Each structure stands twice: as C-alpha cells, then as structure tokens.
C-alpha cells in the first residue's frame, strides 16, 4: 500500500508491507518525485536509511542498497537507477602523489589513504632505473624522499628497494617522523597498476626519451591498463610517441598544447579536433589567469574536461567546482571529497526543489 504526505517543500512516499517483487519508488531527501526506482527483493528488520550509498559522483548509477521507509519496515532492494532532470556534474578528486600531506608521497600508504578518503584518481610520476625498470617517484633523485642519495637513473631497482621511502616524511615540520622504519618501499609502475586494478592512474612521464616511452607502453600492455591510465608529460615528444603507438589512450595537453588552446580560445578559433582528451592546467601561470568559467565552458563544448592543479585550500576548491571544472588535483583528497559532496548535495537540492511527490 502506498501513501504520501506533504509538508511545505518536503514530501515522503511511504510503503506499508511492500510485496516482494513489486516496483516501488522513493523521493531522495523528499525533494524529487520518484527519483529512485527499484524492485523489492525481501524484507527484514531495521537497516540504514537510503542516502548517498549509490549517489557517488555520477549523473546515473546502479547497484545495491537498502531503504528504510517510515514505520520501521526495512526493504532490501536491487537494480537501483537514479535519474535527474539534468545530470549532476561529474566531479573528480585526483590525489596528487596520493594523500601526500598525511603519508610519504607516491608510496602505497599515501595511495591507500587517498582512496579511503574518496579520491577517484591517483596522480603520480615515473622514472626509469639503471636496469630499465619504471618506478614511481616525483624527483629524479631520491635524496629528499628516502634515506639514500643519488639519481634514480643511476640506481638499480634492487638498490632502490633497500631504501626507506618513509624516512624523510614529517607531517609537523620535523617534530615527528611516523613512517621511519615502517618498510615503505618505492613502487614500480607495474606494482602500482596491479595494486589498484579498478582505479584510474594519472601518470606524468618525467624522462624525455623514446626508451622510457617504450617501457611505459609495454607495462600498460602487460597490465592491460590502456583504458584506466591518463598520460601527462611536459615533453611534447613523449606524448607524440604515446599517441602514435596507441591512438585511443587518453592524454593530457602538453604545455605547448595548452598554449595553443589558449590562443585559439582568445582568438575565438574552434579547431575541429585536438590531439589531447583533457586539459590539466594550473589556475594561473605567473600573472596570467588560465582557468575561468568561459574557458571551462569552451573546453566543455569541445568535449574536453578541465582538471586543475594543485589545489589545497577549501575556498579555491569550492570556487573551481562552481566554475565547472571536472577535477581537482590535490594533496588533500579528504578535504576535496568533502567539498565535492557538499557541492553535489546542493546541486541535488536545487535541481529538485519544487518537484515533489503529490
């Protein structure tokens, strides 16, 4: 039996003794008419209320959840589909070297923590060792991130594996070093892709060489990771080689390509196609502001999402999501995830206000 009650802008749909196999619907937050539709599978005692368990960050999603109608009867449901009058914005949190303010950058503890905090993408950098292995590290030398010294290109993988990559990390300017002696190792790119098989990895190819690109491509092939890697590089030649070898792979714009996009934007020129699939840019470079609402909209019209780096303060995060950027590259994924959720909550409320169940 279905009943409804209305109180100002809030409305509830109540189900008493729902029949197994019946089609039912509920109003999420009470702000939408039949926002969620599902099939009753079975009934049992109290369960957590339906809220964000399926919403996530996508305009439509499916899966399993539980709903608790008024009256204490819980319904276990499946095949849930969320539909909105207009799609919610797709917002990403890209963890810059993992949760690098709370754990050693580019290490498993930092990546694990970032995903626990709600990051969608792990951003990282790679270099090649003396014996041809590709490892995850931002700097070409290990002095600032380990208890060793020297260039990665002059070390073998086994030598790097013996170093403590948690040794230098301090969250409080030298008061404590919580990861020293915790066996924090450098990761190879293969290990990274294997550890997180369902996660998008944004890889910055640091070395400028055909050898490093070939090694990188061979790893993607061995790990079958073509569809979940975004390739970035400050070196145009690296991106050119990657695109020639695998035209379907997603690449970010190089520095020169960003400059060409900006020239085209200011000259109101609309090329038929760009060689990149995403713009990843800073808010400004020097005195020149790059990110604006108009630029983000122009990019969107050309099928190009905009990710902005590196954003660590709450006010900037809110402002950039409001401008319409797709992603924030941040050292603080927990904060960015919270700001994103607040933004999406507000979007849902505004989108459905006034469209309530009768």
Image (cartoon, rainbow, N blue to C red):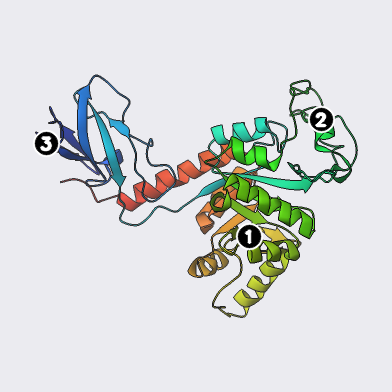
Q: Residues within 10 Å of mark 3 (few under 14, many from 20)?
A: few
- Badge 1 element: loop
Q: Nearer the viewer, mark 3 or mark 2?
A: 2
Label 1 or label 2, whichever comes before in sequence order: 2
Label 3 or label 2, whichever comes before in sequence order: 3
Classify 243 as above or below 121: below
Residue 152: give its label.
none
**Residue placed under numbered mark 1 in the picture:** 252
- Badge 2 element: loop
Classify 63 as above or below 241: above
**Residue 107 quadrant:** top right
Q: Residues within 10 Å of mark 2 (few under 14, many from 20)?
A: some
Residue 339 image point, x, y percent: 52, 42
* Residue 316 seen anywhere in this rendered image of the structure: no
**Residue placed under numbered mark 2 in the picture:** 168
Label 1 or label 3, whichever comes before in sequence order: 3
**Residue placed under numbered mark 3 in the picture:** 2
* Residue 326 seen anywhere in this rendered image of the structure: yes
- Badge 3 element: strand
| Residue depicted at x 54% and y 60% | 305
Q: CA distance from mark 1 to mark 2?
A: 31 Å
Question: From the viewer's perspective, is 162 left or right of 65?
Answer: right
| Residue depicted at x 63% and y 60% | 252
| Residue depicted at x 71% and y 57% | 233
Q: CA distance from mark 3 to mark 2?
A: 62 Å
Image marks 1 and 2: residues in contact by CB distance under 8 Å = no
Q: Is 120 in front, or is 294?
A: 120
Q: Is 182 in front, or is 245?
A: 245
Q: Nearer the viewer, mark 1 or mark 3?
A: 1
Question: From the viewer's perspective, is 357 left or right of 95?
Answer: left
Classify 193 as above or below 277: above
**Residue 184 quadrant:** top right
């Amino acid at each position: 039996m279905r009943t409804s009650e209305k109180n100002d802008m809030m409305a509830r749909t109540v189900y008493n003794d729902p029949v197994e196999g019946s089609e039912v619907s509920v109003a999420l937050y009470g702000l939408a008419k039949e926002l969620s539709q599902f099939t009753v599978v079975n009934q049992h005692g109290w369960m957590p209320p339906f809220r964000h368990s399926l919403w996530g960050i996508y305009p439509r999603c499916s899966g399993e959840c539980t709903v608790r109608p008024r009256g204490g009867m819980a319904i276990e449901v499946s095949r849930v589909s969320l539909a909105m009058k207009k799609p919610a914005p797709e917002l990403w949190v890209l963890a810059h070297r993992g949760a690098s303010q709370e754990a050693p950058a580019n290490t498993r503890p930092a990546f694990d923590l970032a995903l626990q905090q709600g990051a969608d993408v792990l951003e990282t950098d790679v270099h090649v060792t003396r014996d041809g292995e590709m490892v995850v590290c931002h700097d070409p030398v290990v002095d600032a991130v380990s208890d060793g010294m020297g260039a990665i290109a002059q070390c073998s993988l086994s030598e790097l594996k013996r170093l403590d990559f948690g040794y230098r990390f301090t969250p409080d300017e030298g008061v404590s070093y919580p990861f020293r002696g915790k066996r924090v190792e450098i990761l190879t790119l293969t290990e990274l892709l294997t550890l997180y098989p369902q996660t998008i990895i944004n890889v910055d190819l640091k070395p400028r060489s055909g050898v490093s690109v070939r090694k990188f491509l061979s790893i993607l092939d061995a790990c079958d990771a073509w569809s979940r890697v975004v390739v970035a590089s400050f070196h145009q030649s690296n991106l050119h080689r990657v695109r020639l070898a695998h035209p379907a792979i997603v690449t970010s714009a190089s520095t020169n390509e960003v400059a060409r996009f900006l020239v085209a934007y200011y000259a109101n020129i609309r090329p038929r196609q760009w060689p990149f699939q995403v713009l990843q840019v800073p808010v400004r470079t020097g005195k020149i502001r790059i990110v604006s609402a108009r630029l983000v909209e122009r990019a969107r019209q050309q099928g190009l999402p905009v990710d902005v780096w590196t954003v660590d303060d709450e006010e900037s995060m809110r402002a950039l999501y409001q401008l319409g950027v797709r992603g924030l590259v941040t050292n603080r994924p927990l904060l960015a995830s919270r700001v994103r959720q607040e933004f999406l909550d507000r979007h849902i409320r505004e989108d459905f206000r006034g469209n309530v169940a009768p």
